Image (cartoon, helix red, strand yellow):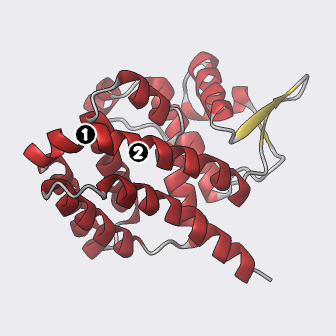
Amino acid sequence: MVDLPQLPEDPSKLAREPLREQIRQVLVEGLLSGRWKPGERIVERRVATELKVSQAPVREALRELETLRLIETVPNKGARVRAFGVQDMAEIYPVRAGLELVAAQLAADTLAGDPTPLEREVEALQAATARGDVAEQIRHSVEFHREVVRAADNSVLMHTWESLGVEVWTALSVRWLDMELHAKAVDHAQIAEAFRNRDPEVGQMLSDHVLNYVEAAMRSTEKTP
């Protein structure tokens, strides 16, 4: 059995992120690495023992993963991994694309006046791409989109967007589909430029960019024998 990654020992890291969030990240990495297969149980007590924490934050992290539809709770059996796949993406990504279309419309004036937050993430994404650092590519790709939603200055929109678990599904997309993230970096640069130039089509550009993940997933599935 593959061991779980350990929680960070850096005190500053522990201070920045709630324990629940750190455990959630560890559990997600376990799903991505194949530690748990679809249908397999995730034993709360065992995870708590391995991570040297109480069961309470593990339980909270598992509830969050259930909200993201990555696991399901079975009566008298506890949590187990769902057989998630491309169909889940086909349901989640159009919702995300619609939210980001609205976000782009609300944020257009703000980001035209100061596109620095987007350009900063584009630069970081390009640097990560040049290094071949997939984890950082994913992080800065998601942060780019988060900056657009943040600039919309709408708390309901932000909360709804965050509830989709964008980081998790982006990571899953990349791992499943071997997504060419360098192409995504180019997309992000073009979108940032469109905001700077007050392009009226920037919202549609952003929405189409998100939906491209689903289209790539469908093509990948069709090629699979």
Seen in the picture, residue 118 relative to 23 is either above or below; the reply is below
User: For the view shown, which residue lies furthest in the front direction?
Assistant: 200
- Who is closer to the viewer here, 62 or 179? 179
Judging from the image, what secondary structure is the residue with disc 2 in? helix
Q: Is residue 84 left or right of residue 162?
A: right
Q: Is residue 118 left or right of residue 33?
A: left
Label 1 sits on what residue type? Ala
Q: Residue 138: x percent and y percent?
A: 40, 57
Other residues around mark 2 within 10 Å, as few (<14) / some (14–19) / many (≥20)? many
User: Looking at the image, which residue is at 51% across and 66% down?
Assistant: 212
Q: Which mark is on residue 107? A: 1
Seen in the picture, residue 20 relative to 183 is either above or below; the reply is above
Figure quadrant of residue 205: bottom left
- Tell me if label 1 and label 2 are in contact, CB under 8 Å: no
Residue placed under numbered mark 2 in the picture: 100
Figure quadrant of residue 201: bottom left
Q: Residue 56: x percent and y percent?
A: 61, 16
Other residues around mark 1 within 10 Å, as few (<14) / some (14–19) / many (≥20)? many
- Who is closer to the viewer here, 184 or 103? 103
Label 2 sits on what residue type? Glu
User: Looking at the image, which residue is at 22% across and 58% down?
Assistant: 199
Figure quadrant of residue 224: bottom right
How far apart are labels 1 and 2 at the CA level? 10 Å
User: Looking at the image, which residue is at 18% across and 62% down?
Assistant: 193
Judging from the image, what secondary structure is the residue with disc 1 in? helix
Q: Residue 66: x percent and y percent?
A: 68, 32
